[in-house]
Image (tube, rainbow, N blue to C red):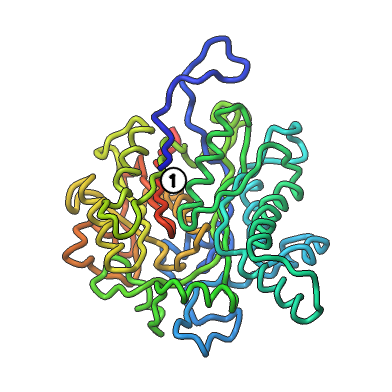
Amino acid sequence: MSTETAARPRPRPGAGQPGPAAAPVVTGIGVTAPNGLGTEAWWAAVLRGESGIRPVGRFDAAQYPARLSGEVPGFDAAAHLPGRLLPQTDHMTRLALTAADEALADAGVDPAALPDYCAGVVTAGSAGGYEFGQKELQALWSKGGQYVSAYQSFAWFYAVNSGQISIKNGLRGPSGVLVTEQAGGLDAVAQARRQIRKGVRLVVTGGVDSSICPWGWAAHLAGGELSTAEDPARAFLPFSADADGHVVGEGGALLVLEDAAAARARGAGIYGSVAGYAATFDPPPGSGGAPRLRTAAELALGDAGLTPADVDVVFADAAGRRSADREEAEAIAGLFGRYAVPVTAPKTMTGRLAAGGASLDLAAALLSLRDQVVPPTVNSGAPAADCPIDLVTEARRPGPLRTALVLARGRGGFNAAVVVRAAA
């Protein structure tokens, strides 16, 4: 288990006296999602309840039992990136570079004008290495190329993905990649927050993922958690009595996280602050230990100096499997009370995006605070009787909203929770 404890007084670079560390703020958002390319296009689709789940289009999936996915629509890498980068990158990296460009532009940051080493990149990776690995194997089979092990392939791929963002934008500060599957987008933001508390001015952070390729699909199927429904409106139904799996999607969100004082000094627009974070790890299956998602949420609220009564909306992990949904609903109801806080899962419109999913939820939470509206959970309908939560299933629900809690669980027992607060 790992947790980041409640905020304590920490010295700030250049300060004569230690003082409480201000929560870093989000000043830019970049999105590539199955129901919208670009932040505002995606957010408008979310508020309309418009799904991006449809039959797989990136390869012929007719031979597989699961044939639906969430794919980023109308993405032409050549229209978004310099031609020199196209031979060096795969689909996932191109999506990530596009999201990073949007996030930096949205934040009003000119990377070339930043002092050396004051800005870095911390992202999350998970399943996207499958497509890269498949290309390596295809090269081996067709050309007799040098063998690259799966481990080497994935590790190198993730480093390159984060490194491409750093190199393209000249961000030579701290960098890194976290691999905790669906929880990764939150864990990366937490690591970026640590770097800012150490004195780094700005970090591009979050996650973008894509594994919609034959090799990746085989791995997803082997996990036994995909829905085999053929109707996009019935394939991903978290918290429903009819839930029977999830849909794989691609994309995610990258955020610009900044030191609060530096952001305000340059007059940056602020979406909100990352006020609290915690991570926990579930006990081994069959050990009899209880899941620890609720503990992560409690610790994140403690880190933010808040109580459950301060939370206005919860963005759920929403696994789409009956047992996992029941566990999450019990965690939420146990912490807040039965039906006591609005809960939403806009990922029903995108599918689960692996490392990109939680950071996209974080973007949705920040935009919810900005626009004072809770986005819907489409298709699921009323939650099952054993999921006693106030699931937002109408078109949208108005605020007031001040604080949001974002939850995420990754394959293998990872739990993460982030608390975001509206800009003052």
Image location (x, y in percent) of residue 122: 60, 45
Between 186 and 147, the one nearer to me in the picture: 147
**Residue at the limit of the structure toward the bottom, as seen here:** 63
Residue 370 in the figure: left or right of residue 218: left
Residue 194 in the figure: left or right of residue 418: right
At a point 58% along the width and 34% down the height, the residue shown is 195
Q: Which residue is mark 1?
A: 370
Decide: is 121 above or below 303. below
The quarter of the rendered structure image containing the N terminus is: top left
**Residue at the limit of the structure toward the front, as seen here:** 287
Residue 389 in the figure: left or right of residue 219: left
At a point 33% along the width and 33% down the height, the residue shown is 302
Image location (x, y in percent) of residue 396: 33, 60
Question: Which amino acid type is marked by label 1?
Answer: Arg
**Badge 1, how many Cα within 10 Å: few under 14, some, many 20+?**
some
The quarter of the rendered structure image containing the C terminus is: top left
Q: Secondary structure at mark 1?
A: helix
Decide: is 66 above or below 320. below
Decide: is 200 above or below 324. above
Image location (x, y in percent) of residue 119: 67, 37
Between 68 and 78, the one nearer to me in the picture: 68
Count of numbered badges drawn on the protein: 1
At a point 43% along the width and 68% down the height, the residue shown is 349
Image location (x, y in percent) of residue 335: 23, 45
At a point 66% along the width and 69% down the height, the residue shown is 133
